[in-house]
Amino acid sequence: MGDKRQKNQLQMVLAFTDEGRSEAPKARREGTESLTAKRACESPAIPEQMMEEVCDRENLKRALQRVKSNKGSPGIDGMTVDELPGYLKQHWPAIRERLLSGTYQPQAVRRVEIAKPDGGVRKLGIPTVLDRFIQQAVMQVLQGRWDRTFSEHSHGFRPQRSAHQAVAKAQRYIAAGNRWVVDLDLEKFFDRVNHDKLMAAVARRVSDKRMLKLIRAFLESGVMENGLVSPVEEGTPQGGPLSPLLSNLVLDELDRELERRQHRFVRYADDCNIYVASERSGKRVMQSVTSFIRRRLKLKVNEAKSAVARPQERKFLGFSFTGGKEPKRRIAPKVLLRCKQRVRELTRRTRGISLPSITKELASYLRGWKSYFGYCQTPSVLHGLDQWIRRRLRSVIWKQRKRRSSWRLANSPALSMTFPNAYFDSLGLPHLAAG
């Protein structure tokens, strides 16, 4: 019933956009679909009216659905995702007119800092809900044109591509005899993208001046922090739908250079690993690629976090690899430590909530964790984690019964028989290991 009401709401909100539809976008799509999707040095900037496609009813409908499903917090104006449909119903004609005339001006993003797992903070820029909606609509149009021109070695933030695919490709490189990795970490990449260089890359692919002006406006909309708006001269703030696509465009130049050199590499957003046969080759590649990134991309490699090393000594997208002729995917040690720390937080014996409530929260976390890290090929690690988690829960039970807390007693045969694994299964606790 709720889905039907949401569908009707979307149709009602966007019904007025029918007047902006024309046959031109359809004809253009039919023309581009007939082109062969080949990897080219640059996509030709074909004269076209992209902004009309952005404002196409079906494109807007998909954008609104995505913004609603992503949820997210408000921007500087305080508008929530739930309030957006009503706002569009009232104000869309005027917004559409500003987009088509090239006069739309986005608002500043709201600065949010979140802690990184390995220390430090990651700065996010949260656009207003309206700007997120428009960015999503723009991204859908641009991605439909650009994605097929990107490198097959790029996996981040792209349709039908995933981190698991990137990890599997790295594993194949290692198995083929490339037992050294050049692990490149771009220092504060999203904060340091050069606007002029980025816009030059966009202009080689986009001829609609309104689109170019709008993208530039998003880049330079400013950041509000502690009530003050500061100008932005570089970077593509993380937090908006358009940022990942623009970042892939910037790093596509790096992909092409690595392909030209015939390197075996895999990239996921700003994580790039190059696999080579020897340490000597790795050091040579590290030096030359670092120089290219600094000179051509105007970016900086974080030397403290980058290295030439054995793959089993490094972490890539949360995974590492075992040694031997047939390397297997394993969960990186730091990831396991963070998982245990989170479980400890959720199962603190002093939280003062019931075991079913604790288990419900824990189960939600573990299902999400398993959906990603269950891709590992070391089931014994998952089995050991399962045992450790259930021991933690038995310790919670012992404490809640006003008994003296004891980690040793939580592993006793008596408690294991009284509260077997089947008991925790009945509470909905998932198993990380299969079987």
Image: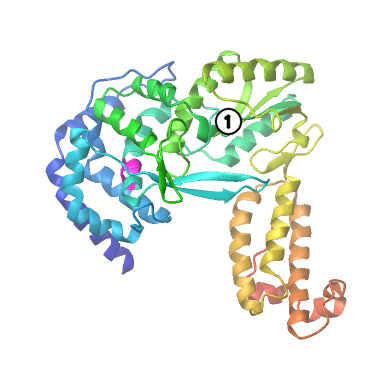
At mark 1, the secondary structure is strand
Residue at (35%, 49%) from the top-left corner? 128
Residue that protrudes farthest toward the left in the picture: 19
Q: Quadrant of the N terminus?
A: bottom left
* Position above or below: 287 against 52: above
Q: Nearer the viewer, residue 28 or 223?
A: 223
What percent of the width, then of the height, locates residue 144? 35, 33
Q: Is residue 358 magenta?
A: no
Residue that protrudes farthest toward the bottom in the picture: 402
Q: Nearer the viewer, residue 120 or 182?
A: 120
Q: What span is colored magenta in the figure?
A: 133-137
What percent of the width, then of the height, locates residue 186? 60, 30
Q: Is residue 179 visible in the rendered structure shown here?
A: yes
| Mark 1: few/some/many CA within 10 Å (<14, 14-19, 20+) | many
Q: How is the image coloured?
A: rainbow
Residue of label 1: 267
Task: Report the label total.
Answer: 1
What percent of the width, then of the height, locates residue 341? 72, 59
What percent of the width, then of the height, locates residue 320? 72, 40
Q: Is residue 258 visible in the rendered structure shown here?
A: no
* Position above or below: 197 against 418: above
Principal secondary structure, stretch drawn in magenta: helix
Residue at (60%, 41%) from the top-left corner? 164
Q: Quadrant of the C terminus?
A: bottom right
In the displayed structure image, the side of residue 182 where residue 395 appears, left or right = right
